Every structure is written in structure tokens, then in C-alpha cells.
Image (spheres, rainbow, N blue to C red):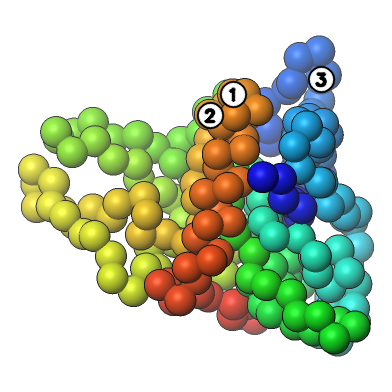
Amino acid sequence: MGHKVFVSYKYWDTDVQDIYPITNCTARDYVDVLEKRLGNYNVYKGEKDGEDLRTLSETTIWEKLKNRIYDSSVTIVLISKGMRERGRYDCSQWIPWEVRYSLCEYSKDEITSHTNGLIYVVLPDSNGCFNYFVEHKTCCTQECDLMNTDVIFSIMKGNLFNKKENHLHSCDYYDKLYSKSDSYAIVVKWDEFIENDLTIQEYIESAYQRSLHKSEYNLCTKINRT
């Protein structure tokens, strides 16, 4: 089953690996690849970046975004090393608003939208590494992934490990570990996500299915204003 997919990303982030034969890639180049691949089974809900939110009211931001996100059912956020601009409040950057409106329900023309499923796709940095955000740990028999959530926005962090009844278990060193299903947002590396059309569709469908069971999660829709 296909879905309408909205993609959120930091347009001019250049700290990403080049996609052969393109050089000096930005996050936008990854969106171009993703758009083509989504088109095989899904509808890409594109949007333009580069607008400054700092002088806009929440109402104006809402008007700009709602038509882009309104009839989509899954939102993909591309995590890149420079996605979060230091020195600027979260509320003055696009991605947190796009996540917020993806998770909110609202009405238009007497039709109410539904909460989107959420996927965080981690892009490789300019060195081809993912460990700026997600690092695979093999220190014990319970192999796990460690996430550096300082890289992402607070609203994105709030939708990780937010299941009301989580499945915590202990590793060999008695640290508490979450299972992958304990997060509303699905986290996947770019190369694993884009491997083939089937894997893309499986991740999108899994995110959509979680949205149908959103009551099992404490969804975060709050944007940090400091």
C-alpha cells in the first residue's frame, strides 16, 4: 500500500557524503534521490526550504506548512550533522515545526487530518560516518545502538523512547536498554533505508502502522523556545 510522504530536512547542510557522481552534496541532493525512489510506490510531498521563521508568527508558519503536510500520512526527517543551527532557537528553524504539524490533527474543509507516522533517516556525514548520531555498541552480548540526541531538535528527541509501556531490559553491565519498538519514531541509517524498494516500503508501512496505535505513545508536540 502506498502513502503520501512528507520529507523534512536541512536544505543547505553540506556536511554529508557525496552521492556519486555528484560532488559538494547537500542534504537536498539526498531528497532528490529519495523523491525518485518514493515515486515507485508512494507520493512525495515536497516542500521548499530557505525561508526565515524568526519574524513570522505561529499563525503564519501554520498557514505555510499545513497545506504541505495536511494530507500526508508519513513524515521522513533526514538527520544530518548540521541540521540544527547552533545559536538559533528551535522555534526559529523549520524542522521542529514540520515535525509538530506532522503529529497534530487539524481540520480543513470539514476533513480532519491524522497523525503522521515518523521516520528518522540518518545521513552519512562528509566522512561517510553515522556515529555523529548513532553508534553501534558491541561491549556486551546485548548489542545496541547509542544515539547522540544533542544533534537533533528537542521535539524529535521527545518522540524517541516514548512508549507508555516500554520493554526495558538490562545489558551485561546492568545498563537499561530500550527495544526499537519503544520509540514512536523509527530510526534507520540511509544505506539501510534506501537499500531497495522493498525496504523503503517496509519502513514507511511500519511508521504508518505505529500512527494507527499512537495512543500507546506519549507523543511530543512541544517546540523548545529557548
Residue appearing at x 90%, y 54% in the figure: 48
| Label 2 secondary element | helix
Is residue 197 left or right of 59 when viewed as pictured? left
Is residue 100 left or right of 42 when viewed as pictured? left
Instruction: List x then y, in percent, for residue 156.
Output: 55, 63
Q: Nearer the viewer, residue 87 or 154?
A: 154
Q: How many marks?
A: 3
Residue appearing at x 66%, y 50% in the figure: 76
Instruction: List x then y, in percent, for residue 15.
Output: 69, 36
Q: Label 1: which residue?
A: 195
Task: Count neighbours of disc 2 (C-alpha within 10 A) and say few if under 14, some if 14 to 19, many if 20 or more.
Answer: few
Give the quadrant of the C terminus.
bottom right
**Residue type (three-letter) at the residue carrying disc 3:** Thr
Q: Does the image show residue 47?
A: yes
In the rendered structure, which disc, 3 or 2, sits on the residue that comes first in sequence?
A: 3
Q: Are marks 2 and 1 in contact (CB under 8 Å)?
A: yes
| Label 1 secondary element | loop
Residue 39 falls in image quadrant: top right
Q: Nearer the viewer, mark 3 or mark 2?
A: 2
Task: Count neighbours of disc 3 (C-alpha within 10 A) and say few if under 14, some if 14 to 19, many if 20 or more.
Answer: few
Q: Are marks 3 and 2 in contact (CB under 8 Å)?
A: no
